């Protein structure tokens, strides 16, 4: 017991020293699009009572939990709980997780390392094209295995595009799947880059539909190029399909919105540690006479919501579909001397009218989700007709 008491005294003293001194971490730039920020100089009063309570709980867990846990394991768990408890995006990254994350380029779209195919006999979705030794295979998944849910969404009534939309997301992000005959979920990382070229479709009613999977560095230039390419066909409207778009680069969303606005605020970021920043549209009349529609669903998020809100609130586009996801945060990476890092929310997005996107999402002008019995082509035709009839 004396040995344990000495450990707790050392822990208590160490925590007092950590909180009582000014913290500093050296810069750690990397080639990816992620923004690394070092912990700024900060000092605060030592929360004595809170530290005492933590040490007391630490001791109870260390001495009484059914399985023996090392001090390092307990501290890692405590750190993860501290950061993940802040919001649904912030997390502590181990050295290996951080190493993998900085290899990715922000704005890339990715999926998992297998496909899901529909089995018409069982009417269930099964794993296909999973390679032996892949990350998912190492977690116990296998070809032919049935998957019931992705991120708590049942798959049995979904079509191929909808299931694919659940698998897709920002590269390095995670999703949860529930295999058949299992009450637990498995967490997978989206690490397989997906082709993200904008897909143009000109419908018979002379409406150009542009499917934008994610906002990347040259998205605005590509939108501009495609509209100019199809302008000779006497376009009646352009519909930007942002369904399942997880966001991407804020700068790309701002540049894309600027194509269709000639003035006004596009988005504001507000931060306790970094101050507020406003992004304004530049004067331009290039595409001011084109009728616009935006199609969103529950998985349209982040930069896609910034783009949608700007055009909706400036009454520049008619928004159709479902309420969007509601992810309106800016995150930064804080490298630690150990090689680990914190991925933490530092700012929130606000729409031109001052509405917070986080947790709220963007409400469409006209709610019209894809009916279960309707085919994709018919749905897009209906959406474009609604845009043509809309009056802003």
Image: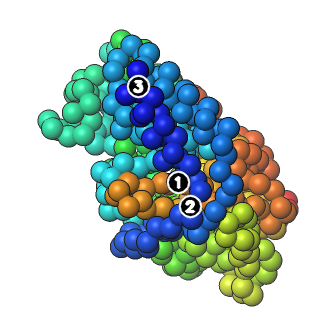
Relative to 392, say whether 7 is above or below.
above
Asked if one can make out residue 312 in the rendered structure from this viewpoint, the answer is yes
Instruction: Check the image and name the residue furthest to the left.
Output: 132
Q: Is residue 209 visible?
A: no
Tell me the CA gap for discs 3 and 2: 29 Å
Labelled pair 1, 2 in contact (Cβ < 8 Å)? yes
The residue pinned by badge 3 equals 2
The tag on residue 18 is 1
Toward the viewer: 342 or 214? Answer: 342
Residue that carries the numbered disc 2 in the rendered image: 21
Q: Is residue 172 left or right of residue 126?
A: right
Pointer 1: residues within 10 angstroms few (<14), some, or many (20+)?
Answer: few
Q: In the depicted view, which residue is nearer to us: 23 or 148?
A: 23
Residue 222 shown left or right of residue 93 in the figure: right
Which image quadrant: the C terminus? bottom right
Which is nearer the N-term, disc 1 or disc 3?
Answer: 3
Q: Residues within 10 Å of mark 3 (few under 14, many from 20)?
A: few
């Amino acid at each position: 017991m004396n040995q344990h008491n000495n450990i707790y005294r050392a822990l208590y003293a160490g925590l007092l020293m950590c909180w009582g001194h000014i913290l500093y971490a050296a810069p750690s730039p990397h080639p990816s699009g992620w923004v690394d920020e070092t912990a700024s100089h900060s000092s605060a009063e030592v929360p004595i009572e809170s530290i005492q309570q933590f040490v007391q709980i630490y001791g109870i867990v260390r001495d009484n939990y059914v399985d023996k846990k090392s001090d390092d394991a307990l501290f890692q768990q405590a750190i993860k709980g501290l950061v993940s408890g802040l919001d649904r995006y912030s997390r502590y990254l181990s050295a290996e997780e951080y190493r993998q994350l900085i290899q990715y380029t922000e704005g890339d779209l990715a999926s998992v390392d297998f496909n899901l195919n529909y089995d018409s006999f069982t009417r269930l979705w099964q794993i296909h094209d999973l390679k032996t030794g892949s990350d998912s295979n190492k977690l116990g998944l296998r070809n032919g295995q049935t998957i019931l849910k992705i991120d708590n969404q049942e798959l049995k009534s979904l079509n191929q595009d909808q299931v694919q939309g659940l698998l897709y997301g920002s590269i390095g992000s995670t999703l949860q799947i529930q295999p058949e005959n299992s009450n637990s979920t498995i967490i997978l990382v989206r690490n397989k880059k997906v082709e993200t070229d904008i897909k143009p479709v000109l419908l018979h009613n002379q409406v150009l539909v542009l499917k934008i999977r994610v906002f990347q560095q040259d998205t605005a230039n590509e939108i501009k190029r495609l509209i100019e390419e199809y302008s000779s066909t006497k376009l009646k409207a352009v519909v930007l399909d942002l369904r399942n778009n997880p966001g991407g680069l804020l700068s790309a969303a701002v540049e894309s919105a600027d194509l269709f606005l000639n003035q006004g605020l596009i988005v504001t970021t507000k931060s306790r540690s970094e101050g507020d920043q406003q992004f304004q549209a530049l004067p331009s009349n290039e595409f001011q006479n084109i009728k616009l529609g935006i199609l969103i669903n529950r998985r349209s998020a982040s930069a896609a919501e910034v783009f949608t809100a700007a055009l909706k609130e400036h009454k520049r586009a008619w928004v159709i579909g479902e309420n969007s996801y509601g992810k309106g945060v800016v995150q930064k990476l804080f490298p630690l001397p150990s090689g680990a890092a914190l991925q933490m929310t530092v700012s929130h997005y606000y729409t031109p009218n001052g509405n917070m996107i986080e947790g709220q999402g963007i409400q469409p002008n006209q709610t019209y989700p894809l009916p279960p019995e309707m085919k994709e082509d018919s749905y897009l035709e209906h959406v474009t007709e609604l845009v043509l009839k809309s009056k802003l």
